[in-house]
Amino acid sequence: MEKFWLESYPEQVPAQIDADRYASLVEMFDDSVRRFGDRPAFANMGATLTFRELDALSRRFAAFLQSRLGLDKGDRFAIMLPNLLQYPVALFGALRAGLVVVNVNPLYTPRELRHQLNDSGTSAVLILENFAHVLEECLADTPVRSVVTTRMGDLLPFPKSAIVNLVVKYVKQLVPAFHIQGAIRFTDALSEGASASLRPVTLGHEDLAFLQYTGGTTGVAKGAMLSHGNVVANVEQSTAWMGPFLVTGEEVVITALPLYHIFALTANCFSFVKIGGLNYLITNPRDMPGFVRELRKVRFTGITGVNTLFNGLLHASGFADLDFSALKISIGGGMAVQAAVARRWHEVTGTTLLEAYGLTETSPTVCANPFDLEGFNGSIGLPVSSTECCIKSDEGEVLEIGGTGELCVRGPQVMKGYWQRPDETRACMDADGWFHTGDVARFDERGFVYLIDRKKDMILVSGFNVYPSEIEEVVSSHPDVLEVGAIGVPDERTGEAVKIVVVKRNPGLTRESLDAHCRANLTAYKCPRHVEFTSELPKSNVGKILRRELRETYG
């Protein structure tokens, strides 16, 4: 197909990337270690790991995974951590051992965690002690054989490491009691790995790197199979897009989105590792005063986030007084960037808040706005290098420029499919290799893509996918609920929020009872913020809840 959007590319951004430049993410990382050895790679809580130090620690962890845990190429290894230095050590260690990384949200409830560990067939888990009590509750019902636990300060220099761990556990009391038989401490794992030999593992483009969980378009979370080739290609696409505007070996990016999220994983972690940049990790971006204090310590050149994060910073005391003279790029993704937030961001920082678009299934970047864009334009940008996009009608016809239909994507970053779900894979990937995103969009004459609406019923809360069927399943399990429908409603803080419309089984059912039930079974961002009771839900003649009518009536 004709890539008419190429004429809108900035100078020096190539139409095609070399997807074969690296055989794997490990080869890419090894190249960065050789090129940038003594430069800082990751910083967090006042400590820094250079590329060479990260190389040594990840080798130790990989050797431990092979020798002590007996993990082989293709085994699944879950990482359940917030943004700490332990994350990149474990990530590159697992990839070096040839394992498939299963990223897990550390705020998951036992029900959510049980599903992901079982569905993925995870053999071993690395988890922050703060969340180990959740794993303990469901561990016996999973295939997990080995557990490694870590504490918040484990990779900080002594005595700060000891002080942080004591404060977190005994002063702030952030570590609920747990007991996991045979659990191994992360620090012990690194010690054991130092005396073990790392067996080299041959990796290629077809080998899986991640089972990255998403709801796709409907239902329960499923694993998008992202190969080394998929992610390497998207890193090449991202760095080709940024290349003319950044200086190799000199950039500092603020990484506040969790690395277990595909956006931060590729756009921050891997992309800035490739160009020798520093990922400055923010462990708790919800603590806005603490976040601003961290920003005051570093001369950062880039920041990524979702609309709610940028909006939160703009309203945080002291943010407007920071030094933004080094800031080159600000990228918003995961959810729509609001024009008011983008306008205010430019006023405060002097940089344009650039919107990009991607999905878990596309590793994630599909479209991005050019970095030389002079002002916010409301689009999700242009298809990135080596990417084809088209707009299709419901009948599968490719529409002309300006036509509104489903956005479809084809390129080397598109997943291999959903883990053990061939039917769902076929439902979203057609015979010509197009991935159907479920998003309704249009092209303008310059090749910029504008999202119109979502074709499916997914709710987007602060950049995270929330699926109505999951919410409805949990709420309907409450003994006093007869029926429930879940929808998304606009929210100034999170973009959208979950609203449930409930038909009572027991007239005594209260909002408080529903809130407690949801908190026990759903991650916080999935919990309904709005509850409305009704006598009946709108349904079709076969009893299916009519979500469109639900939104029109209660949205």
Image: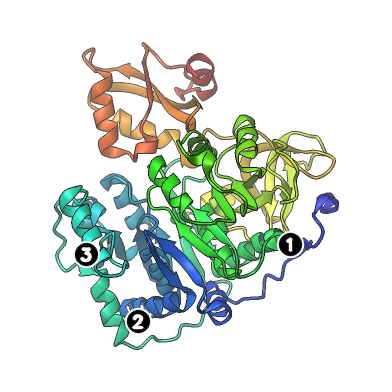
Query: Considering only order in the chain, which callout, 3 or 2, is on the residue closer to the N terminus?
Result: 2
Q: Nearer the viewer, mark 3 or mark 1?
A: 3
* Secondary structure of residue under mark 1: helix
Q: What crowding class fits label 3: few (fewer than 14 Cα within 10 Å), some (14-19), or many (20 or more)?
A: some
Query: From the viewer's perspective, is residue 307 above or below residue 269?
Result: above
Q: Is residue 461 toward the left or the right of residue 434 in the image?
A: left
| Three-letter code for the amino acid on which mark 3 is drawn | Ala
Query: From the viewer's perspective, is residue 491 above or below residue 121?
Result: above
Picture coordinates of residue 151 (x, y %)? 25, 61
Q: Which residue is mark 1?
A: 244
How far apart are labels 2 and 1 at the CA level? Answer: 38 Å
Q: Nearer the viewer, mark 2 or mark 1?
A: 1
* Secondary structure of residue under mark 3: helix
Q: Which residue is mark 3?
A: 162
Q: Residue at x 75, y 46 (%)?
A: 373
Picture coordinates of residue 404 (x, y %)? 74, 33
| Three-letter code for the amino acid on which mark 2 is drawn | Ala
Residue 488 showing in the rendered view:
yes
Query: Mark 3 touching mark 1, by CB under 8 A?
Result: no
Q: Considering the image in quadrants, where does the N terminus appear?
A: bottom right
How far apart are labels 2 and 3 at the CA level? Answer: 26 Å
Query: Considering only order in the chain, which callout, 1 or 3, is on the residue closer to the N terminus?
Result: 3
- Which numbered dot is residue 63? 2
Q: Residue at x 55, y 78 (%)?
A: 27
Query: Considering only order in the chain, which callout, 1 or 2, is on the residue closer to the N terminus?
Result: 2
Residue 525 or residue 203, whichever sits in front: 525
Picture coordinates of residue 2 (x, y %)? 85, 53
